[in-house]
Amino acid sequence: MLRAHRERQKKLLPLFSPELRATRMAFAKGIWDLFLVFTLVFWISICFLYGAGYDTMRHIKDSTFIFRNFDDSQTANDLSSMIIAGFEDPNAPLLKVYTGSEKYDSVAAIKDAVWKGNAWGAVIVNDGFGKQLEQALSEGADYDPTSAVTLVTEESRHYFKVIMVNKAAQTVLTALEGPFSQKMFQQMVTADGANATRVIDQANANALITPFSYAVDNVAPYHFDMSMYILSVTLSLCMVVGSFIPSNMWKSIEEPFYKQVRITHVIALRAFINIIWAAFICIQATGIVFAFHGPLWSPSTRDFFAMFAIFLLNTLSFTFFIDCMQNWVHPRFLLGGYFTTLFVNIAAAVFGPELNNHFFRILYAVPFNNSGLMLRTLLTNGSYNKLNFAITINVLWSLVWWLGSTFLIARKARRVYEGKMLMANVPPPAAPQPAVALEKDAAHSPTNSSALSEYLSSATASSGTTPSPSETDISARMRSARARKSNDTTSDIEIEDM
C-alpha cells in the first residue's frame, strides 16, 4: 500500500506547478518555524514561572531573623536557649542572636530594621516575661501567654516568600510551647517538694498549660488583592498596550517613509509618539488603580503621581526594548520574544528573586521586579525601601534600550534607503535577470532570417533600375514578407486539417 502511494505521488508530483510546490514548501516551513519558536517560548516561560517560586524552603537559610532577649530572668534565659536550638532546624530561617549586643538594643530599633528590609523578621523575648510567669505559677496572678514573645514580621518584601518564611518561624515557636510547659512544671514540682497537687491548685491555669506563646506584630501589612492586580495585570497591560501597539504601528509604514524622511526626523518622531502614547496609557492605568484601591489604602495626590511615574518608567523601558527587536530581529521571532519577555517579567514581579536558585536571581535585573519593589514601598508607606536601587536599574534599562533603538533605527533607515533591507528586517529578493532585447531575438529568428533573405534577393535583382531603399522602405518590406510567410503557414495548417 505504501509503495502504491509513493508511485501515485511520483506520477502526480509533476502535475503541480512550480508555484504551487513553492507555496506548499513555504507553508510547511512556516508551520515548523511556528512550532519551534513557540516551543522555546513555552519552556522558557514555564522555567521562569516555576523557578521564581519553586522550592523556596531549600534556600530558607538565606532569610535572617533577629533575636533579642530583653529579660534577664532564668526563665527567659531557658526559653532563649530553646528558641536558639529550635531555629537550628534546616527548615527554619537563620537566627542571628543580638542579646547583650549594642546593636538593636531596643524594640523600636528591631522593628525599624525589619521595616527597612535589613531582616525578614525578629523574635523578641519581652522584658518582664520571667517575673510575670513566676507570679502566675506561684500566686495565680492573671497571665497572657502571648505577652512572652513577639514575632515581628512584614509582608511587603515579597508576599509569597514572606508567607513561607513567617510560617517556618511560627512552626518553630509553636513546637516549643509543649516542651517548655513540661520543663516549667517539672521545675515547680521539684521546687515545691514533689507536691504536684499543690502546684496545680495555686497556679494560673493558662500559665500552667501554656507558659509561653507569641504575638505577631506585622509592621508592614500587605494589600494582597490590590498588589496582585497591580503587579500581574496593570504592569502587563501597560507593557502590552503602552509598548507593543506603538512599536507594531511602525510595521505598517511603507519603505517610502524611510526613503523620504531624514533619519534624525524618523528617530525623533518615533521617540515622541512612544513617549506620548506611554504616558496616555499609564495615566489611565493609574486612574483605574486609584478608583478601585479599596478601604485598606488611603492614597494622596503625591501617591498618584508617584505611581504614574513608576508605570511610565516601566513602560518606556519595554517600549525601547521592543523597538530594538522591531529593527533587529527576524519577523518570525518577534511574537515569541514578546511572550517570553512578558512571562519572565510577571514571574519576577509576583514571586521575586529572593530565596531562589542562584540562576534565577538574575530576576533582580528585570524591570518588573524593580517596579514591584517601588510599588510595594509606595503601598506600605515606605517599608522595604529599595527605591534607589530599583529606580537606578529601570532608568539604566531605559537609557540602554533607547540608545540601542536609536542606533538600530538609523541603521535600518539607511539600509532601506539604499535598497539593502526591507521593512521586515530581511534583505530584498534577488533582482530578476534582464530580458533579452527584442531586436536581437528578431535577428536570430528563422522566420525573420528567411524574410530578410527574400528581401535582399529582391533588392539585388532590381538594383539596376531601383534606387537604394531607405530604412523606412526596408522595414515595410520586412513586415510584408513576414505577413506572407504567416499566411502561407496558416494555409498549410488548414489543408492538413481538411
Image: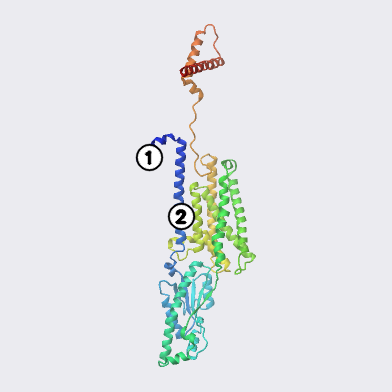
The answer to whether the residues at label 1 and label 2 have Cβ atoms under 8 Å apart is no
Residue 171 x %, y %? 45, 75
Per the rendering, the mark at residue 5 is 1
What's under tag 1, amino acid-wise? His
Between the C-alphas of marks 1 and 2, the distance is: 37 Å
Instruction: Classify 105 as above or below 200.
Output: above
Q: Tag 1: Cα neighbours inside 10 Å, few (<14), some, or many (≥20)?
A: few
What's under tag 2, amino acid-wise? Phe
Residue 140 x %, y %? 50, 89
Task: Write the residue at 45% across / 41% down.
Answer: 24
Instruction: Classify 214 as above or below 302.
Output: below
Q: What element carries label 2?
A: helix
* Residue ID for mark 2: 42
Mark positioned earlier in the residue sequence (1 or 2): 1
Instruction: Classify 217 as above or below 231.
Output: below
In front of the other: label 1 or label 2? 1
Instruction: Classify 161 as above or below 429.
Output: below
Q: Is mark 1 on a helix, strand or loop?
A: helix
